Image (spheres, helix red, strand yellow):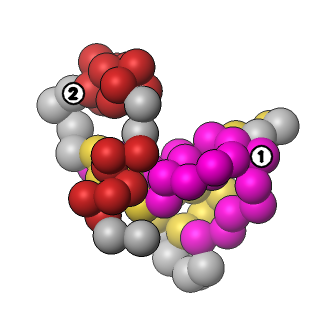
Amino acid sequence: MKQADMCAAVTPELKSCVTCCFSPLQVSVKHAQKFLYVAEIDGSLLMKIGKAKYEPGSQEWKALESGKNWGIWQRA
């Protein structure tokens, strides 16, 4: 999926929340699909929401916190 398509798949409510909560940080959508939303925040955090399994796939990311259907990683 192209990045433009991923951004289009994000609901307006979620876009508004991310903009409100994280401005003026840089937010980049990495995955946006059914049951999985992953965003990179300011180049230093990854945030995952949704019940689909996700792992960053690189040792440069260290898990900080997680719970049911969510996770946060920090760049090591």
Compare residues 26 and 12 and report the one nearer the observer. Answer: 12
Q: Position of residue 25 (x, y in %)?
A: 22, 38
The residue indicated by pointer 1 is 51
Residue furthest out toward the left: 24
Compare residues 64 and 1 and report the one nearer the observer. Answer: 1
Q: Quadrant of the N terminus?
A: bottom left
Q: Position of residue 46 (x, y in %)?
A: 49, 53
| Residue 40 colored in magenta in the image | yes
Q: Earlier in the sequence, mark 2 or mark 1?
A: 2
Q: Position of residue 31 (x, y in %)?
A: 48, 59
Determine the residue positioned at 38% across, 55% down: 6
- Dot 1 falls on a residue whose secondary structure is loop
| Residue 4 colored in magenta in the image | no
User: Looking at numbered disc 1 in the image, what kind of residue is underneath it?
Assistant: Lys
User: Looking at numbered disc 2 in the image, what kind of residue is underneath it?
Assistant: Ser
- Dot 2 falls on a residue whose secondary structure is loop
Magenta segment range? 31-56
The residue indicated by pointer 2 is 23
Q: Is residue 59 visible?
A: yes
Q: Is residue 27 left or right of residue 10?
A: left
Determine the residue positioned at 66% across, 57% down: 63
Give the vertical position of 36 relative to 24 (above or below): below
Q: Is residue 65 visible?
A: no
Question: Alpha-carbon distance for marks 2 and 1?
Answer: 26 Å
Give the vertical position of 61 relative to 12 (above or below): below
